[in-house]
Image (cartoon, rainbow, N blue to C red):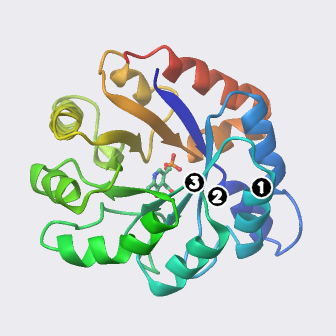
């Protein structure tokens, strides 16, 4: 059964708007777990614009589900991951000026470099995922690297105007999922998914986890975390296996 992992970065975005102590992302994570999230995701960015180091540490101590740390492939982040020991890390590209992660990580042509970067992480018993575009050469490189998971970037699909363009992006993702599964990779999906556009995947098998943040936190402002997470969890758990 596909499961939901909830990204709580934007609870921290709101807190950082006042540099204060509320709202607390750890509380949001607990409520998400109670409402059916199978994992919690945070992106510790180099510029610390939302999630802070203490959030990652507190979540590691308190969570009962899985903690997935999204991070750039830098020495600093690897040291933090080896210290905090999340259940998994997801390597993402990061640019300081971007509003959010824009494209997938370029792994094609960087197999040895990324393998070497991940080796201490694997040795510490932490699983890895690579956030990549649904391109055959990126998926093949991820397979050669030996990562357990990939997360296919759904942003191009989510941002495309409805109609032909969006259908083409959906097709690219479906082919990517099939390609990756045939190569033995576990596949997660994420970025820009919401209560409507996620429904396109209901008959698409082979997805382990849906990684969703902004749409859930946006809805939670009006309905509360429990309802917002519960509804999304029920949606994705009803999808094809
Ligand atoms: N997956 C990755 C790798 C991301 O960088 C993000 C955004 O932080 C998400 C999933 C969640 O995207 P959204 O907040 O649009 O649901």
Q: Residue furthest right?
A: 21
Disc number lying in front (1 or 3): 3
Q: Are marks 2 and 1 in contact (CB under 8 Å)?
A: yes
Dot 3 lies on which element? loop
Residue 87: mark: 3
Q: Is residue 152 visible?
A: yes
User: CB at mark 2 closer than 8 A to ligand 1?
Assistant: yes
Query: Hey, which quadrant is residue 117 in on the image?
Result: bottom left
Residue ID for mark 2: 9
Q: Residues within 10 Å of mark 3 (few under 14, many from 20)?
A: some
Report x, y in % for residue 236: 50, 23
- The residue singled out by tag 1 in the image is 25
Q: Secondary structure at mark 1?
A: helix
- Residue furthest to the bottom in view is 75
Q: Disc 3 beta carbon < 8 A from ligand 1?
A: no
* Mark 2 vs 1, N-terminal side: 2
Q: Is residue 39 left or right of residue 169?
A: right
Q: Is residue 83 left or right of residue 58?
A: left
Query: Of callouts 2 and 3, which one flags the residue occurring earlier in the amino acid sequence?
Result: 2
Along the line of sight, the residue nearer the viewer: 140 or 200: 140
- Look at the image and tell me in which quarter the C terminus lies: top left
Q: Residue at x 41, y 21 (%)?
A: 199
Residue at position x 77%, y 72% in the image: 54
Nearest the eye: 4 or 98:
4
Q: In the image shown, does 138 or 154 lie closer to the viewer?
A: 138
Instruction: Establish if 162 lies above or below 110.
Output: above
Q: Is residue 236 left or right of residue 185?
A: right
Name the mark nearer the viewer: 2 or 3.
3
Where does the image place residue 20, in percent across and percent down from the top left?
87, 72
């Amino acid at each position: 059964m596909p499961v939901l992992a909830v990204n709580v970065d934007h609870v921290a975005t709101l807190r950082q708007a006042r540099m204060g102590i509320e709202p607390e992302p750890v509380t949001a994570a607990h409520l998400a777990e109670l409402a059916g999230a199978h994992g919690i995701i945070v992106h510790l960015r180099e510029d610390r614009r939302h999630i802070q180091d203490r959030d990652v540490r507190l979540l590691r101590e308190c969570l009962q589900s899985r903690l997935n740390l999204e991070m750039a492939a830098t020495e600093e982040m690897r040291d933090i991951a080896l210290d905090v020991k999340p259940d998994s890390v997801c390597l993402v590209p990061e640019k300081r000026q971007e509003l959010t992660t824009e494209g997938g990580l370029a792994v094609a042509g960087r197999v040895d470099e990324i393998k070497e970067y991940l080796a201490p992480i694997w040795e510490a018993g932490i699983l890895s995922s690579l956030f990549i575009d649904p391109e055959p050469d990126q998926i093949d490189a991820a397979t050669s690297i030996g990562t357990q998971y990939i997360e296919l970037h759904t942003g191009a699909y989510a941002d495309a105007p409805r109609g032909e363009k969006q259908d083409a992006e959906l097709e690219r993702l479906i082919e990517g999922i099939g390609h990756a599964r045939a190569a033995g990779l576990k596949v997660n999906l994420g970025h820009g998914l919401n209560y409507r556009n996620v429904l396109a995947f209901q008959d698409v098998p082979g997805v382990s986890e849906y990684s969703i943040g902004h749409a859930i936190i946006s809805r939670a402002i009006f309905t509360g975390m429990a309802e917002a997470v519960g509804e999304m969890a029920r949606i994705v758990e009803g999808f094809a296996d």
